[in-house]
Amino acid sequence: MDPTWFLSSNEILTVQNSVKMKISVIIAVAHMSMGIVVKGLNALYFKQKVVFWFEVVTGLIILNGLFGWMDALIIIKWFYPMNPYSSLPGMVDKIN
């Protein structure tokens, strides 16, 4: 979860909305990618090479190049330890 959402006064609702938004984006990109793959399978079955190369391959490159990268950044951010109260972003303060 995004630790900066804990700085707001309404912690629980804000954190839940953030997680729901990020998960819905990940599911949407997976769903659209699956649709393009099915279109590609249909193009191969019906031997439509132009459709396969110019719609399917191009669509997958654009979709996953832009939104797939965004999904990767969301997932990386979930596993990257951050402390919103630290003066050094990305650093976890050690208690000695």
Image (tube, helix red, strand yellow):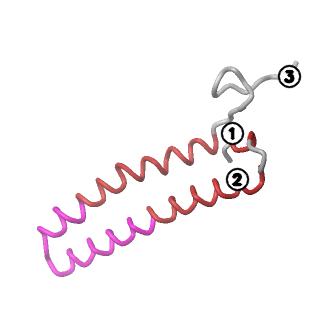
Instruction: Assess whether residue 31 is covered by the magenta stretch.
Output: yes
Q: Residue furthest front?
A: 9
In screen coordinates, is 79 left or right of 30? right
Is disc 2 placed on a helix, strand or loop? helix
Earlier residue among tags 3 and 1: 1
Quarter location, residue 34: bottom left
Query: Around disc 1, counting alpha carbons within 10 Å, would you say few (fewer than 14), some (14 to 19), or many (20 or more)?
Result: few
Mark 1 or mark 2: name the one nearer the start of the chain. Answer: 1
Amino acid type of the residue that numbered disc 1 sits on in the rendered structure = Thr
Q: Which residue is mark 1?
A: 4
Give above or below for 80 relative to 12: above
- Location of mark 3 (residue): 95
Judging by the rendered image, the residue that carries numbered circle 2 is 14
**Closer to the N terminus: mark 3 or mark 2?**
2
Q: Residue at x 64, y 26 (%)?
A: 89
- Specify whether 73 is left or right of 53: right
Q: CA distance from mark 3 to mark 1?
A: 20 Å
Residue placed at 70% from the left, 40% from the top?
3
Q: Residue at x 41, y 53 (%)?
A: 67
Q: In the displayed structure, would residue 22 be above or below residue 30?
A: above
Q: Which stretch is magenta?
A: 30-57
